[in-house]
Amino acid sequence: MKLARIETDDGIHWGEYDDGTVITDDQAYEPSAYRLRAPCDPEAIYCVGRNFGEKVEQMDYDIPDEPDFFIKPPTAVCAPGEPIVYPSFTDKLTYAGELAAVIDTTCSNVSRSEVDSVVRGYTILNDLDALDQPRRTARKAFDGSAPIGPWLETEIDPDSIEMETHVDDERRQADSTENMFIDPRTIIEFLSERFTFTPGDVISFGSPANPGVLEPTNEVRIRYDGIGTLSNRVVAPEK
């Protein structure tokens, strides 16, 4: 089942997404009556890097023995369809199409066998990266650096999902989550030993190799089979 978070004239609602229609407890909303919002309201976004072979080769990284992670703040969230504002402080912005889980309940020390019971669903995250900045937080934790959506898929196995990313009409990424070094459930178990998750928190599992950079007017479309497509267009910063 696909769960969407939408904004309507009468507020924010959750509902089941069915071929464009979103069905809440009270009524059905057609596409013209709502805007998709990010399918979560996180306190933290936990992102894992160096988790695909081609990515490790591209960046000349060592293969990690355990999840290599960093954290983005809530202000990094960007809704599906909203513009990606090209940061004024970088000349080298890139993308990364990632599978992400959204947590359903406050939890910590979650065993791998318990992971499915604490995950509300899976979605897509674009881990934007200002590559020319000096440290990881400066590169990755800026406002709007985590487009996420378009909705949650509650009935999918994260271990074998095909994905691809297009920038305009050029395919830039194509891979499968079965090629991750560390699988999603193991990552959630590992992070939960260190952090207490709260409802809406996001765990993103890393990206395949992502050649090229972004420029204003580019449209980024990230598709994970069984979930959907996250689309955002890059716009120039206001002067």
Image: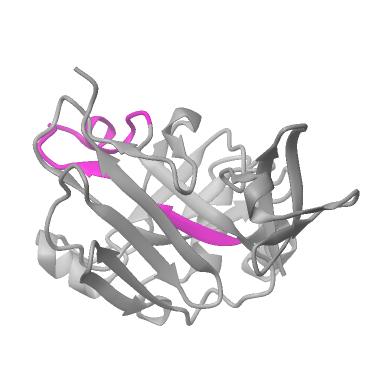
For image coordinates 37% across by 29% down, the residue present is 143
Q: Is residue 17 magenta?
A: no
Residue 159 position in % (x across, y down): 50, 78
For image coordinates 68% across by 46% down, the residue present is 33
Residue 48 position in % (x across, y down): 38, 54
Residue 57 left/right relative to 105: left
For image coordinates 15% across by 45% down, the residue present is 215
Residue 84 left/right relative to 211: right
Which residue is nearer to you in this view: 222 or 194? 222
Q: Does the magenta stretch include residue 136?
A: yes
Q: What stretch is highlighted in magenta?
A: 122-143
For image coordinates 23% across by 62% down, the residue present is 168
Residue 198 position in % (x across, y down): 67, 39
Residue 124 left/right relative to 165: right
Farthest-out residue, right: 26
Which residue is nearer to you in this view: 85 or 59? 85
